[in-house]
Amino acid sequence: MSVGPLDFADAHACAALERLLFAGESPWPAAAFAEEMRAPHTRFYAARRSTPEHPRPWLVGYAGIALLGGAEPESEVHTIAVDPKAQGRGVGRRLLTLLLAEADAHGGPVFLDVRTDNAPAIALYRSEGFENIGMRPRYYQPSGADAYVMCRPAADGAAETKGTAR
């Protein structure tokens, strides 16, 4: 598996994976991925896999983060998604590691929202220092699923948690 920057050419593959993983919610279309990738304050990464039978790498996961704030920086994980066939193999952790490296270079705390019933994701985030700081009732639409708001303090420990993900 290789991990690197997400390309504009990946937008349609991301949208297809979104529809598979988040069908009961509001999956992002390809245009939303392209728009997010154009934003100067975001960073997106892709995980790709190839096999001897299929040497052309295909997308098995993606992740994005927004680097926000000026004098008081913070970051917000926008998305992490892994193809069900590749889950449980460290793909999500590798993508999260890249996002957190971006956040640490930017400074400040890191926020994210996660479905309250997504135990594997919650465990991953907790293992990386995130803690629950709140809940958003009926956050995901149209399903109405609740979300936890989680925060990882600034890597240097100096910044206070002053808000929630936007």
Image: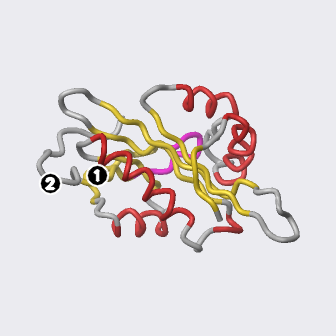
- Give the quarter of the figure containing the N terminus: bottom right
Is 130 positioned to the left or the right of 47 in the image? Answer: left
Task: Give the residue type at disc 2.
Answer: Gly
Q: Residue at x 76, y 57 (%)?
A: 57
Residue stretch in magenta: 140-147
Give above or below for 60 relative to 87: above
Indicate which disc residue 157 carries: 2
Residue 164, horizontal then vertical, whole percent = 28, 40
Q: Which mark is residue 81?
A: none
Q: Position of residue 162 (x, y in %)?
A: 17, 39
Residue wearing tag 1: 151
Q: Quadrant of residue 129?
A: bottom left
**What amino acid type is highlighted by mark number 1?**
Cys
- Image check: 31 left or right of 89? right
Quadrant in which residue 50 is drawn: bottom right
**Point 70% across, 50% down: residue:** 17
Q: In terms of image quadrants, where is residue 82?
A: bottom right
- Between circles 1 and 2, the one closer to the viewer is 2
> Does the magenta portion include 166?
no
Who comes first in sequence, dot 1 or dot 2? Answer: 1
Q: Are marks 1 and 2 in contact (CB under 8 Å)?
A: no
Identify which residue, 47 or 129, lies in the foreground.
Answer: 47
Residue shown at the point (64%, 49%) measured from the top left = 22
Residue density around tag 2, few if under 14, some if 14–19, many if 20 or more, within 10 Å: few
Q: Check disc 1 and report its element: helix, strand or loop.
A: strand
Tell whether 80 sits left or right of 125. right
